């Protein structure tokens, strides 16, 4: 069977950054599964997998705009040190989760965002909210392990999970 709309797909993969370094692989987490045609993975990746069958090996190269977006200098944030607990042990390179609030846009209140600590000074902490692979071409080396039509239960479960994620603002 070939990968098409409403197929359950299981893959082995390696994700390489623009320098060719492996940044993630299925041997760390187990095979990746997704429901094809339901926006569960990057659209360009899904398009590249269309028509592949069990056992096929693919190398899919994605440009920044197809993957994790361009690097955005506006995502560098300077947060007053007073916004963090005094005893917080934060060091450059750490990833932290911050809660958002905006007096002009109440839709963002309560949402969270991950950011990497870039610099710490007595007055402020500089954070980078860009995805770690933003601005980079990435390559997915993949092997298709399984392809089959999704069951009704799988379709319903994925739909319910997506609805729950949307309700949580994700």
Image (cartoon, helix red, strand yellow):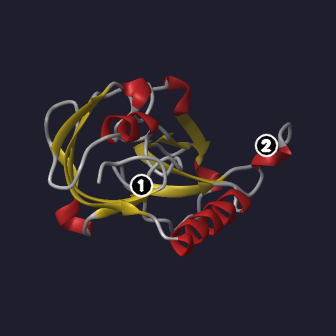
Q: Residue at x 26, y 65 (%)?
A: 31
Q: Position of residue 142 (x, y in %)?
A: 20, 48
Disc 2 secondary structure class: loop
Residue 49 vs residue 35: left or right?
left
Residue 126 vs residue 136: left or right?
right
Closest to the observer: 94 or 164?
Answer: 164
Quarter placement of the C terminus: bottom right
Mark closest to the chain's N terminus, 1 or 2 = 1
Residue 165 vs residue 155: left or right?
right
Q: Position of residue 132 (x, y in %)?
A: 36, 41
Q: Residue furthest front?
A: 1
Q: Which residue lies furthest to the bottom in this view?
A: 153
Q: Residues within 10 Å of mark 2 (few under 14, many from 20)?
A: few
Q: Residues within 10 Å of mark 1 (few under 14, many from 20)?
A: some
Q: Position of residue 21 (x, y in %)?
A: 14, 41
Quarter placement of the N terminus: bottom left
Closest to the observer: 15 or 72?
Answer: 15
What is the spatial separation of the Cα atoms under label 1 and label 2, in whole angstroms? 22 Å
Q: Residue at x 54, y 32 (%)?
A: 75
Residue 159 vs residue 144: left or right?
right
* Above or below, comparing residue 145 to residue 120 in the picture: below
Closest to the observer: 165 or 160?
Answer: 160
**Residue pointed to by mark 1:** 95
The answer to which image quadrant residue 162 occupies is: bottom right
**Residue pointed to by mark 2:** 102
The answer to which image quadrant residue 46 occupies is: top left
Q: Residue at x 43, y 65 (%)?
A: 89
* Above or below, comparing residue 29 to residue 82 in the picture: below
Closest to the observer: 7 or 88?
Answer: 7
Disc 1 secondary structure class: strand
């Amino acid at each position: 069977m070939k990968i098409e709309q409403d197929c359950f797909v299981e893959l082995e993969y390696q994700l390489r950054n623009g320098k060719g370094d492996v940044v993630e692989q299925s041997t760390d987490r187990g095979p990746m599964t997704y429901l094809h045609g339901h926006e569960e993975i990057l659209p360009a990746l899904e398009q590249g997998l269309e028509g592949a069958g069990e056992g096929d090996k693919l190398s899919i190269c994605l440009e920044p705009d197809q993957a994790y977006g361009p690097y955005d200098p506006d995502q560098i944030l300077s947060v007053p040190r007073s916004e963090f607990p005094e005893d917080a042990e934060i060091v450059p390179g750490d990833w932290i989760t911050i809660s958002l609030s905006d007096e002009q846009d109440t839709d963002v209140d309560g949402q969270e965002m991950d950011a990497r600590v870039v610099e710490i000074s007595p007055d402020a902490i500089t954070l980078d909210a860009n995805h770690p692979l933003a601005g980079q071409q990435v390559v997915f080396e993949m092997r298709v392990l399984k392809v089959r039509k999704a069951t009704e239960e799988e379709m319903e479960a994925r739909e319910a999970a997506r609805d729950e994620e949307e309700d949580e603002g994700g």
